[in-house]
Amino acid sequence: MTPQRAIYLDHNATAPVLPDVAAAVAGALELGGNPSSVHRFGRASRQAVDRARAAVAALVGVPGTWVVFTSGGTEANNLALTGVAAGRVLVSAIEHDSVLRAAPDAVRVAVDRNGVVDLAALDASLAQHGGDRALVSLMLANNETGVIQPVAEAAAIAHRRGALLHCDAVQAAGRIAIDMGALGADLLTLSAHKLGGPTGAGALAVRDGVQVTAMLRGGGQESWRRAGTENVAGIVGFGVAAEAAQQGLARMADIAALRDEIERGIRDIAPQAPIYGSAARRIANTTCVGMPGVKGETQVMAFDLAGIAVSAGAACSSGKVAPSAVLGAMGAGASAAAEAIRVSLGRGNTAEEAKRFVAEWKTLYDRTRRLKAA
C-alpha cells in the first residue's frame, strides 16, 4: 500500500521555504560582496539589501528607512524592549517568551477568557506605572490561539498616557493586512521564516523620532542601530517572502474555510472539546483545540506517527512540552491547558488534508475513550 503523504500543519512554528525564496537566497550567496564595500561587488550586495528592505517595509506600509534588519523576531523584540530608553515596561500576559524574557520585570496586563487584552486594565496600569515614558508591548496576533489584539486602541491609550507601543507582528504578517501607521505602533517586529522566508532573518520597524540604542555594537550598519555585516542572503530571501506574503493575503479566506472545517469536524466528534479564542477575531490559519483526557504531547506524537505535524504550544522551548501559559492567562486550568494542541495552516494545505486531520483526531480520541472504559 502506498504510504500517505505527510501533512504539515505547523506553519506558526515555521513556514516551508517558498521555491522563489530558495532561488533568491542561492543567487544572493553568489553575489560575494560586502554591502559596506564601495566596489561593484559591494554595490551589488547593497542594492540587493535595499530592494529587500523596500519589500519588507511595504509589507507593513512604512518607509524603508524605518526597517532595521535583525537575526529574527527574537532579536527584534529584544532590541525593542531593551533598546528604547523607556521607564516602566508593560506587556500583555500572552506575549511570546522573547518579549516576556526580554523584560522579566515588566508589569503584566491581563487578558479576558477569549485571550484579548483588557484595555481598561492597560489604562489603569499605565496610570499607576506609566511616568517617564513607559513602553507597552502588545502582539498583533497570538502565536498559539491566533487571537487578534486591539493594537490600535492600545496604542491610543499608551500615547494618551505618554507611553510608546511596540507590536510583535510576527504571526500576523502575511495573514492579515498590516499598516503600522494605522496601528499607531512606534516599533513593530517581523520574522522571515513565518512567511516562507529563511530562518535567521527578521526586522524591527522603528517610527521616525523613536531612538533605539543598538544591542550589538561595532560598525554603523542599519543606521547604527544594529552592527554587523548584513546577512545578505537571508535578507534577500526575506524580501521575496514579504512580496509573496502580500500576494497571498487573497488566499486567507480559503485558509479560514479549512480552519473552520476542522473545527466543525472536531465539534461534531466531541462537542465539549474547547477551541480557545474562537469567540474572538483570529487570524485565518490558526486553531488551538483541546482533546479531553489526552495530553497535548501524546497528541503531537500520535499525529506525527500518522504523518501529520502539529504542535503543543509555542515551538521555542528546546523541544519541551509544557502547559501553555497563554491558555492559563485565558483562565484554562493546568490540566485543560495541557490537553491543547495548535494547528496552523498554510497556503499549501488542502481540504483533503483537513479531512484527514479530523479523521486522525477522531481515531485518537475514540481509542483513548475505549482504553479508559476498559
Image (cartoon, rainbow, N blue to C red):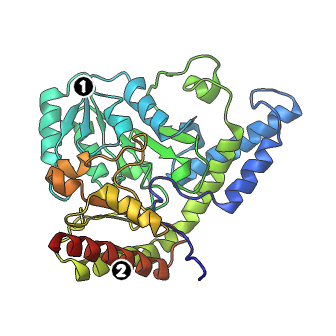
Which callout, 1 or 2, points at the residue further toward the start of the chain?
Answer: 1
Q: Going 67% across and 36% down the picture, which residue do you hit?
A: 231
Q: Is residue 212 above or below residue 45?
A: above
Residue 65, picture quadrant: top right
Which residue is outermost to the top? 218
> Which residue is nearer to you in this view: 79 or 220?
79
Residue 298 percent location from the top left of the image: 33, 59
Which residue does the image show at 75% across and 36% down from the upper left? 46
- Where residue 272 appears, x then y in whole percent? 16, 73
Quadrant housing residue 53: top right
* Rendered position, 232 above or below 344: above
The C terminus is located in which quarter? Answer: bottom left
Amino acid residing under circle 1:
Asp
Q: Quadrant of the N terminus?
A: bottom right
Camera-side mark, 1 or 2: 2
Q: In this view of the protein, can residue 116 be seen by the observer? A: no
Q: In this figure, which residue is indicated by the disc labeled 1?
A: 105
Disc 2 residue crowd, few under 14, some 14–19, many 20+, Cα 10 Å? some
The disc label shown at residue 304, or none:
none
Query: Viewed as shown, does residue 106 lie left or right of 234?
Result: left
Left or right of 354, for residue 234 = right
Identity of the residue drawn at 37% across and 53% down = 143
The total number of labels drawn is 2
Across and down, in percent, residue 121 comes to 13, 43
Residue at x 39%, y 64% (from the top left corner)? 302
- Quick one: label 1, few (<14), some, or many (20+) residues within 10 Å? few
Amino acid of disc 2? Glu
- Give the residue number, with chain letter if any, for mark 2: 261
Q: Quadrant for residue 289, please give it.
A: bottom left
x and y percentages locating residue 66 in the rendered image: 53, 38
Residue lying farthest to the right in this orientation: 40
Q: Nearer the viewer, residue 181 or 214?
A: 214
